[in-house]
Image (cartoon, grey):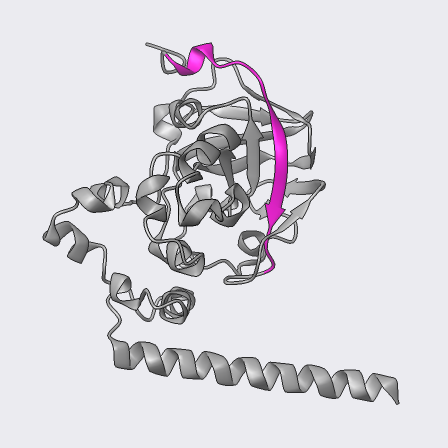
Amino acid sequence: TLSQPPRARSLGMAKVHSIHVSDASMRPMRSIESARLIAGKGIEGDRYATGEGTYVAFQEPGRQLTLISKESAEAHLAGVARGQVTVGNLRRNVVVSGMSARDLEDAIGCVLMLGDACRVRVHRLCVPCLYNEKLNQAPGLMEAVWSEAGVNCEILAGGSLKVGDVVKLESGSFDASSIDDGGKKAAFYKRPSLRTEDEIESLRTLPMGKPGVDRIAEAYATVGANDAVGIDDDAAHAIRTKAELRAVTSATKMRRREAWKAQ
């Protein structure tokens, strides 16, 4: 029995190139020099640690942190949207240099050590979504980086992480039984251009009524990708109108608070 997959056993060391977090679903990512990883939760202040992420309705340990290869992603982004899409636009948390996308894929089921204290279990490929393609106004983005969009990880041991920290494989850490992708269908991992109509349809239905699903519906409706999640145009229009009203109400309340403080 192998303690690690054959290729993963030969992985060398890499480094943290950049760290990115976002306050909530649909909010911009921001780059930070250092972060605190919280075991079993996520990166402090990031939308998946606070329960504000787009896909929190789908409970799985790999939502806690995402890793992506700088070199692999950049190589495949070069021809997308006239080169205007960056690795940061892919909304992954930790950009790693010195490990390829294939290296990260081969680490599925293994533990990676990030810096001096942090340990993460790699659970699955973090395949790109239509929502982000539409958000970036970059047709073809999903296809271009399908195998290079990174991996989903569970934080086993938290601590401080900073740009420049070493990333390396923990020897003997492969455990196939530990892999948990949240019950994803096989079609989920299939390149969109290769999916059958039945496979596309199987991925289109959202479990409406489940806590957090409304956030997915709003995100996709907002960028005009509602058909991908089975929401018709009339329903999408209603969702967008409701979101716009909520935003206006929130902005009005904020202005009133600021005016009150200024008195």
* Rendered position, 241 above or below 94: below
Q: How many marks?
A: 0
- Position of the C terminus, as image quadrant, is bottom right
Give coordinates of residue 80: x percent, y percent.
40, 45
Q: Residue visible at 49% across and 48% down?
A: 84
Q: Which residue is the extreme one toward the front?
A: 82
Q: Nearer the viewer, residue 13 or 121?
A: 13
Left or right of 230, for residue 217: right
Q: Is residue 206 visible?
A: no
Left or right of 194, for residue 119: right
Tell me where the magenta segment starts and ends, as one range.
7-23
Give coordinates of residue 251: x percent, y percent.
63, 82
Q: Is residue 184 visible?
A: yes
Q: Residue visible at 43% across and 36% down?
A: 151
Give coordinates of residue 83: x percent, y percent.
46, 44
- Position of the N terminus, as image quadrant, is top left
Location of residue 175 by image quarter: top left
Left or right of 23, for residue 152: left
* Rendered position, 192 above or below 242: above
* Rendered position, 85 above or below 248: above
Is residue 15 highlighted in magenta?
A: yes
Is residue 60 highlighted in magenta?
A: no
Q: Residue visible at 12% across and 48% down?
A: 196
Q: Residue visible at 45% across and 56% down?
A: 136
Give coordinates of residue 140: x percent, y percent.
32, 48
